[in-house]
Structures are given as structure tokens and as C-alpha cells.
Image (spheres, helix red, strand yellow):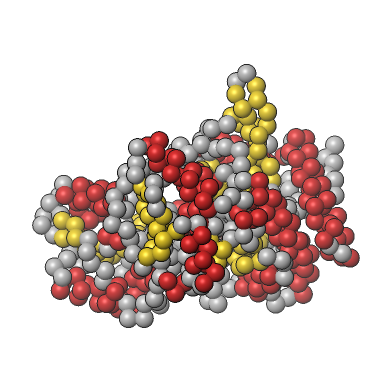
Amino acid sequence: MAKDIINRVGILREYLQENGLSAFIFPSTDPHQGEYVPEHWQTRQWISGFDGSAGTAVVTLSDAALWTDSRYFIAAEEQLAGTPFTLMKDGLAETPSITEWLCQQLTENDIVGADGEVFTSAEIEELEAALGKAGIQLKTDLDPAETLWTDRPPIPKNKVKIQPLELAGETAESKIERVRQSLWVQGEEGIVISQLDEIAWLLNLRGSDVHCNPVFVSYVLLTQNDVTLYIDSEKLDETVKQYLESINVKVRPYGRPACVSKAANPIPTMKSIKNAAEIAGFRKAMVRDGVAMVKFLHWLKPAVEAGGQTELSIDRKLTALRAEQDLYRGLSFDTIAAYGPHGAIVHYEATPETDAVLEPKGLLLLDSGAQYQDGTTDITRTIALGALTDEERLDYTLVLKGHIRLALTRFPDGISGTQIDALARYAMWQHGINYGHGTGHGVGSYLCVHEGPHQIRHTWKPAPLHAGMTVTNEPGIYRQGKHGVRIENTMLIVEDGETEFGRFLRLEPLTLCPIDLTPVIWEMMTPEEVAYLNTYHKKVCDELSPYLEGEEKEWLNRQCSMVNIQ
């Protein structure tokens, strides 16, 4: 692989010289600015070999560097080894920004290239301003991958399907009218919608153009008078065409509409607050997903003790169990099955080259999820496969305490997730431990597993939290070369009363799956934390046991049995 990257960088540098460029910037994005990108636009991965979801590669005539965040430091070091790329650890004080680095590498009147189609206008303006201070120009009408990437995948043309109203909970006409009302209040005539999950939500349609995400490549131009969907017509069968006509949506060939709007987009917030039908769908999907997880966990330890199980083999097993469930439509992201030291790689993905054999000792970090037509799931369990070190038990207990502390929190309506993030970290902070990723993200309703605008994270995120939003609760501890621990439930924000000081909210767990208690140091747990575990496990058992039989049901009852530490 490293040899391929060396060759690609070489031909890119020839391209730069032929086009009078001194550098080129490859972001992780596509024209729709989504987190997950169709293969056609994965140019950063093509040029660098790094396959993480976040990062930017920059190649000059003599140097190459890749910026990514703390989730991917370990993985990026491994994947960039032997290539021309230097890892730039984004977020560290000593790491220069991309423009700072370019200004150091280049000289006045040099020209930097970028594909303007995959940047926002604000990003282009920022790049031009920062580079301009050093007399460096930015050229944005080039896409070297178009000619150099000889086997570049085409833009996908998969069929679009209608999301039934009983699952969507609101008609497309109603959603369109709500957006129009928001635009009217802002004094704006229209808006271009480019985010694929926003288009899918707005029109009550789903697709399969993006890996693990039920969306389709398109744009929408929504004005006070018209709605136009810009899409390859091959994606639309007669049923969908008739549906679009019935809701007065015009269809035009795929391409970005020539319209400039300064309107604030109301769709992310609208989409994040789930209606009654969507919440009911989540609950049903979580039961089916929980059944699959229990079947898997019941099978896991005996299978590991029998020998021959690897990270990839257990991934296949869990996926097969999920696929047996009603309304299963695929995974919501590639499973992270990370054994031992691999658990310290936050977004690890096993390959045939890295596939570790599981042994009856140590920790297995398993982060997984599925797309069901009535809901999207995201769950992490860290499982003790056998004997553990004192450090592994301590880390597990601290993560569990953080998870519970956040889950028990009562907070005012409308605050930022940043204001409660520290609760998940407090116990580990007392031991001088922290983690680099956010604590929680929204989850879509049969849409993207990562959904905004709200998050629970340590860096400032002003988007307010409201009842009806889903959000994950996933603190973790990662020790490079040793192990990783993360415990994650998807939660629903619900109302928790009103006082003279305003409305208050709390988090209700949607995820239904036992939490492994064998690693817990019980002397560190408070009565309140133990009570939470008992309440949660009773709910898990009550919800899932009707769908299980025999040994699997007995196993669930044992895992959910009452804990008494007094």
C-alpha cells in the first residue's frame, strides 16, 4: 500500500508542475459536506491511504502532511508509515494549522490548488485570507483525481425508496411548510439544501448511496413557491416519481443549484427533535437490536474459550444475528471489534492484516450499530474475556462511573451539551485520566448514526439540548499498546418537570443490553450508581426476555440479576 501512495504522490507532483501549482489540499468532504462520503469523493484516502472519517491531506512539490484529530492518531501513524506523509496531530498546541504550514513551506506568488466543489464558501474565504497574508494564491477550479485516479468509482446511482408515513411521523408537505415558515421569519426567499440526510428527512425518502447511511446523492432548492430535487433520474422508479409529483416536488438533473442564500438552515434542529412515531420506532428497533446483542454475548465467551475466534469472525457473527431481525437494513457504521491493544485505537477497524485472535483474557471493546427501517442503533460494550489486570479493572470502573453519572443528570432545557460533558469525565479526572473524543452525539431516525446539531463534548458546542433529541453517552479510557474501554448507550432526552426556575430534562436509555459487571471494582461504586445499574438491568430484562428462550433467556436473567454491595 505504501508503494502505491508513493506512486500517487509522484504523479500528483507532476500534475502540480504541469498546472503551475505548488501544493494541493485534499479534505475529507464531498460537495454535500457529509461526514460519510461516497467512494467517488474519497480523494484524501486515495492520495494518502488514511481511511479515517476526519482528516485533510496536503501535498507540496517536496513535502506531504496529513492532519487528523485525536481519535485517529494511532491509526494514522500506522497507515501513514512508509508513505511520504507526516502526521500532524490536530488540536495539539505544537501542531501548525494547514495554512500556517503552507505559509512555512511556500513562498510569495506560489499557488495552492483545491477542488472548490468540496469546500464551503466560508472555508474558501478563510483559506484565501490566511494564504493571502503570505502572498500565496488559491486556485479552486481543479480536481486532479478526475484524471489521475484511473479507477475512480462513479457517482452512485442506487434506487431511492419512500419512508412510510407511519414511520416518518410527519408528511413531507408539513416539513416543507415548517421550513418555509422559518425562511419567511428570516426574510429569505429560499435555501439550497445539500446535506444528504436533511434531504432524505425533508422528503421522507431513503437511499443507499453512502456506506451505512440510507441517503442518496442529490440537492434540493426550496423556495416559498417551489421545491426542486436535483438528482439523477435513474434513481427514481415510477412509484417515487408519482410520490414526488403528489407533493409538488419538481425533478431536475443532478448538480448544485445556481442560488445563493444566507438563510440559517432550520432543518438540523427540526430533524434532531424526534416526533412520537420516530421515538416509537427507536424503541422497537432497540428491542430487536438488544435481542441480537444478547444472543451474541451469550455465544461470545464460550466461543472464545473454544478457540479460533478473531475480531473479524465475531464481527461477522454479530452482523448475521442482526440481519435476522425484522426491518434490518444494514449496519449503521463499520463495527469496531477491538481486542486488547487495538481497543486503544478509538476508531479501529480490523483488517485481514490486523485481525487479532481473541483469547480468554483481557478486554474486548465492541462498538456497533444497525440501520432498521424504524430506527438507528449505536451501542458499545467492553467485555472481559477472562482474567484482567488491576489497571483494566480500574479503567473499566471509572468509565462506568462516568457513564452512570451522566445518565443520572437532571439539567435545564436549552443548555449546551458542553455544560454537562464534564460529568462523564469527573471520576477519571480524579485519577489524572481523560479522553480526547466527545462524550455524545445525536442519532438519526433511520438516517445517519452521527447527527447534529447538538453534541455532548468538552469543546464548546452551543447547540441547545431539547426533549425529543437522541444522544449517545459514551465515555472512554484508552491506553496505547494496552487496552481501551468504552461504554455507550443511546439515550432519549425527556422532560423531567418544571419548577419556578424553568423546565428540566433528563436522559432515558434507549439501548437495551446488559453491561458487563465482572470487571467492576465494587468498592469504588456508590449506592446511587449501583441502584442505577439495577434499575437499568431490570428494564433490559423486562424488555428483552419475552423474545428469548432457553439458555439465552437464562443468561440474560443472570446478567441482569440484582447487585447488592452492602
The answer to which of 72 and 411 lies nearer the viewer is 411
The x and y percentages for residue 233 are: 42, 71
- Of all residues, the one furthest to the left in this rendering is 109
Q: Residue at x 48, y 62 (%)?
A: 245
In this rendering, the answer to whether 371 lies above or below 312 is: above
Q: Residue at x 26, y 52 (%)?
A: 124
In this rendering, the answer to whether 528 lies above or below 84 is: above
The x and y percentages for residue 519 are: 73, 52
Assign the C terminus to one quadrant of the image.
top right
The answer to which of 155 and 440 lies nearer the viewer is 155
- How many badges with numbers are in the image? 0
- Of all residues, the one furthest to the bottom in this rendering is 150
Q: Residue at x 53, y 53 (%)?
A: 172
Q: Residue at x 60, y 66 (%)?
A: 331
In this rendering, the answer to whether 249 lies above or below 41 is: above
The x and y percentages for residue 58 are: 29, 62
Q: Is residue 323 left or right of residue 461?
A: right
The x and y percentages for residue 30 are: 37, 62
Residue 348 visible in the current orientation:
no
Q: Would you identify the image quadrant in which residue 379 lies?
A: bottom right
Assign the N terminus to one quadrant of the image.
bottom left
The answer to which of 388 and 92 lies nearer the viewer is 92
Q: Is residue 276 left or right of residue 241?
A: right
Q: Is residue 27 left or right of residue 162?
A: left
In this rendering, the answer to whether 355 lies above or below 411 is: below
Residue 19 visible in the current orientation:
yes
The answer to which of 355 and 251 lies nearer the viewer is 251
